[in-house]
Image (spheres, rainbow, N blue to C red):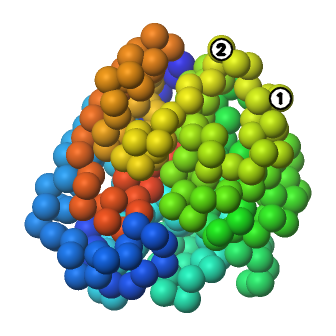
Amino acid sequence: MSNSRQKILMCAPDHYGVEYVINPWMEGQLGHADRSTAHWQWQGLRNALTAEADILTIAPVPGLPDLVFTANAGFVLGDTVVVSRFRSPERQAEEAPFREWFEQNGFIVADWPQDVFFEGAGDALIDRGRSLIWCGHGFRSDLNASNMLEDIYGWPVIPLHLVDARFYHLDTCLCPLDGGWLMYFPPAFDAVSQRKIEAIIPLEKRIIVGEKDAQDFACNAVDLNGRIFMNNASEDLQNQLRAAGFKPTLTPLTEFLKAGGAAKCLTLKLQEHLA
């Protein structure tokens, strides 16, 4: 594992709330997010991450309640970023401030067509043990985003078909971990995609997450230097992680679950250190 510090992009929840419904978690939650609770939960995550990474921020924007979920800003590998193309009209206004932030911070913004939906590091995840990218499709990102990422970065991209609307982004149901481990919730994927995962990740490196942990967004975790920052996890899952050499660190993010996000959704790694 690298000893140099990661850089992570976050956005304070000054304007966070559930103001529309674009995933099942938002149903019945309109206006129910408590912003003061969201603030201390977000600050708790930030404080925890600060031990392992440098935190950069993008300014919150009124009227963009989901800007807080910076994983959806884009996909970064090296100094090149693909800025997201949001499927939901409610989130499309986020693209401009995210693009501006990347440009101002020295990233090369790759060309990407307007008509191909792709929701950044919500759906594209770098494997932690091999030079490949996992890419989810089915709810938010288009299937052909995988081929386009391959062309831009020159890395193999493995498309995975998501089939459970609760797990609408790949990072809600799959988390690559240091050393080539993979934590995931198999029922979120179709049978073909499950077989793809099994063909690449050896059985002894797969950490299977159950339904309750999946609903607590255990897979929506941030891995940093062997620590796994997550909203919640059962003792069984925590023990599996410890047995694999990781240190689970629970930091409650229940206010953000109301919008369908947790630790990973609230962060974007700006430089990937591969094991």
Q: From mark 1 to mark 2, how far is it between C-alphas? A: 12 Å
Q: Is residue 78 in sight in this rendering?
A: no
Number of other residues with Cα within 10 Å of mark 1, as a class: few under 14, some 14 to 19, many 20 or more: few
Answer left or right for 83 relative to 223.
right
Which residue does the image show at 38% across and 73% down from the upper left? 26
- Which residue, given by chain and number where applicable, does mark 1 sit on? 199
Residue contact between numbered discs 1 and 2, judged by CB atoms under 8 Å: no
Percent across and percent down for residue 93 are 50, 86
Which residue does the image show at 40% across and 67% down from the upper left? 25
Answer left or right for 86 relative to 12.
right
Of residues 215 and 12, the one drawn nearer to the viewer in this rendering: 215
Check residue 204 in the rendering and tell me which mark sits there, or answer none: 2
Q: Secondary structure at mark 1?
A: helix
> Amino acid type of disc 1?
Ala
Of residues 8 and 137, the one drawn nearer to the viewer in this rendering: 137
Percent across and percent down for residue 10 are 37, 58
Q: Secondary structure at mark 2?
A: helix
